[in-house]
Image (cartoon, helix red, strand yellow):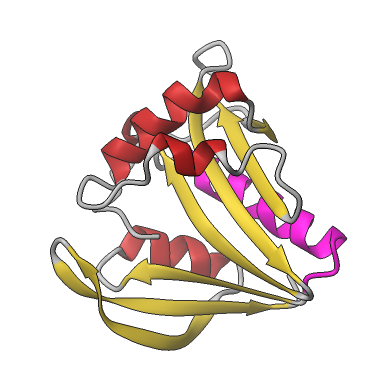
Amino acid sequence: MGGGERQASPAVTTEPAVRAARDSDLPAIVTIELECFRSDPWPRESFEGFIDRAGVTFIVAEDPDRQGAVCGYGVLMRAADEGEVLNLAVAGGSRGRGIGSALLRNLLESAKREGVRQVYLEVRESNAAALALYAAHGFAVAGRRRAYYQRPVEDALILQRVEP
């Protein structure tokens, strides 16, 4: 977790549709990944491995203003009563419209339905927009990984949310 700064856009007027990711979504997901995580993006194969995988919630948000075009995605992995948000990203032109919040809310609801009691994630300590989003959803700093990110070198904050 942890792309660059997030840019604000006008407020969203309609809640985005959030659904399970499909193979046909992969080109859009990879494009968003490259835009959001330029320094260390996941390859397409990583995303392919999460579609329909047991213990993984892999979702996309469709932009209500662009005829359902994929404008964001999220991945959460579960093990026993813990979960980890592995990735969450929203396309630049869609930020600031509640899409990241809708994705995170859906991931947390899925985790809760599956009996997850604690959710973790890592985020660049300089990513103020992501930190604000996670704080608004009940996450708090639980630790730090020094020099976790390499391009540029930066610490990762480990965030935790208990009983999602």
Is there any visible trace of residue 60 in the rendered image?
yes
* Rendered residue at 57%/79% (across/down): 160
Disc count in the image? 0
27 or 44, which is in the foreground? 44
Q: Is residue 77 left or right of residue 148?
A: right
**Type of secondary structure dominating the magenta stretch:** helix
Q: Quadrant of residue 126?
A: bottom left
Magenta residue span: 97-116
**Vertical relation: 40 (above or below) 25:** below
Q: Position of residue 3 (x, y in %)?
A: 30, 53
Q: Is residue 23 left or right of residue 6?
A: right
119 or 99, which is in the foreground? 119
* Rendered residue at 59%/24% (across/down): 23
**Vertical relation: 56 (above or below) 36:** below
Is there any visible trace of residue 94 in the rendered image?
no
Single out the residue that lies furthest toward the left: 152
Q: Position of residue 114 (x, y in %)?
A: 84, 61
Q: Position of residue 59 (x, y in %)?
A: 63, 39
49 or 82, which is in the foreground? 49
Q: Quadrant of residue 112?
A: bottom right
Q: Is residue 127 left or right of residue 108?
A: left
Residue 45: in magenta span: no
* Rendered residue at 32%/35% (across/down): 92
**Vertical relation: 109 (above or below) 125:** above
Residue 105: in magenta span: yes
* Rendered residue at 62%/31% (across/down): 16
- Quadrant containing the N terminus is bottom left
Single out the residue that lies furthest toward the bottom: 143
